[in-house]
Image (tube, rainbow, N blue to C red):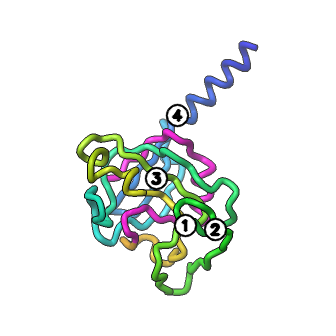
């Protein structure tokens, strides 16, 4: 019994030691733990720049946490509207330079909540109330450039992989 409790404690420590850093400058999401970098993913942040003001379509900076994880068993390319899987598999454009009119959310959602009062948490600047996510995008060919409307976009396969490595409450620093 003591061995099981020790193992449980050990695995909880491993999970809580990880965090995500998002580099706006490099358009990268970096999964790290106490030993260093686990993996670097290409992302797209907002084409409107950085900021927290409501309706600005900007990517908020600062310390966040993953508040909700949505889409565990949704297939790659699965489309969400209002955080609900529609049953539709939306096309993914990796090699074709096709712009999608709508801001399509695909495959997985990591819904972020700001942790810094008056920076990304609070009236008219709240990341959670602004529906700021890390999610899959059909415009994968744009990854590495600023292309979103505030969220952090990833390739569909990458966001599925990341989803399986993270947990609610995990820290996400956007710099």
Between the C-alphas of marks 2 and 4, the distance is 32 Å
Asked whether disc 1 touches disc 2, contact meaning CB atoms under 8 Å apart, the reply is yes
Q: Of circles 1 and 3, which is in front? A: 1
| Neighbourhood count class around disc 4 (C-alpha, 10 Å): few under 14, some 14–19, many 20 upward | some
Specify start and end residues of the magenta stretch as a single range.
148-175
Residue 36: tell me if it is visible: no
Residue at 39% of width from left, 64% of height from top?
A: 27
Secondary structure, mark 2, is strand
Image coordinates for residue 61, horizontal then vertical, percent: 30, 53
Q: Of circles 2 and 3, which is in front? A: 2
Between the C-alphas of marks 4 and 1, the distance is 30 Å
| First in sequence: mark 2 vs mark 4 | 4
Specify the label residue 86 is tagged with.
Answer: 2
Q: In the depicted view, which residue is nearer to us: 78 or 153? A: 78
The residue that label 4 is drawn on is 16
The residue that label 3 is drawn on is 30
Q: Of circles 4 and 1, which is in front? A: 1
> Quarter-wise, where is residue 79 in the image?
bottom right
The answer to whether residue 68 is above or below residue 146 is above
Secondary structure, mark 4, is helix
Residue at 46% of width from left, 82% of height from top?
A: 101
Between the C-alphas of marks 2 and 3, the distance is 30 Å
Residue at 52% of width from left, 74% of height from top?
A: 140
Residue 67: tell me if it is visible: yes
Between the C-alphas of marks 3 and 4, the distance is 16 Å
Image coordinates for residue 21, horizontal then vertical, percent: 41, 49
| Neighbourhood count class around disc 3 (C-alpha, 10 Å): few under 14, some 14–19, many 20 upward | many
Specify the label residue 81 is tagged with.
Answer: 1
């Amino acid at each position: 019994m003591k061995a099981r409790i020790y193992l449980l404690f050990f695995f909880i420590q491993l999970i809580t030691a990880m965090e995500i850093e998002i580099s706006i400058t490099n358009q990268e999401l970096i999964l790290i733990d106490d030993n260093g970098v686990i993996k670097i993913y290409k992302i797209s942040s907002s084409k409107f720049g950085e900021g927290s003001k409501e309706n600005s379509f900007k990517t908020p900076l600062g310390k966040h946490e993953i508040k909700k994880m949505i889409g565990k068993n949704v297939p790659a390319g699965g489309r969400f509207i209002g955080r609900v899987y529609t049953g539709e598999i939306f096309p993914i454009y990796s090699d074709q330079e096709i712009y999608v009119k709508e801001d399509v959310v695909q495959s997985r959602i990591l819904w972020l909540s700001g942790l810094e009062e008056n920076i990304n948490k609070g009236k008219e600047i709240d990341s959670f109330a602004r529906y700021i996510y890390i999610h899959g995008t059909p415009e994968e060919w744009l990854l590495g450039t600023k292309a979103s409307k505030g969220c952090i976009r990833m390739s569909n396969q990458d966001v599925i992989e990341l989803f399986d490595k993270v947990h609610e409450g995990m820290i996400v620093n956007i710099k």
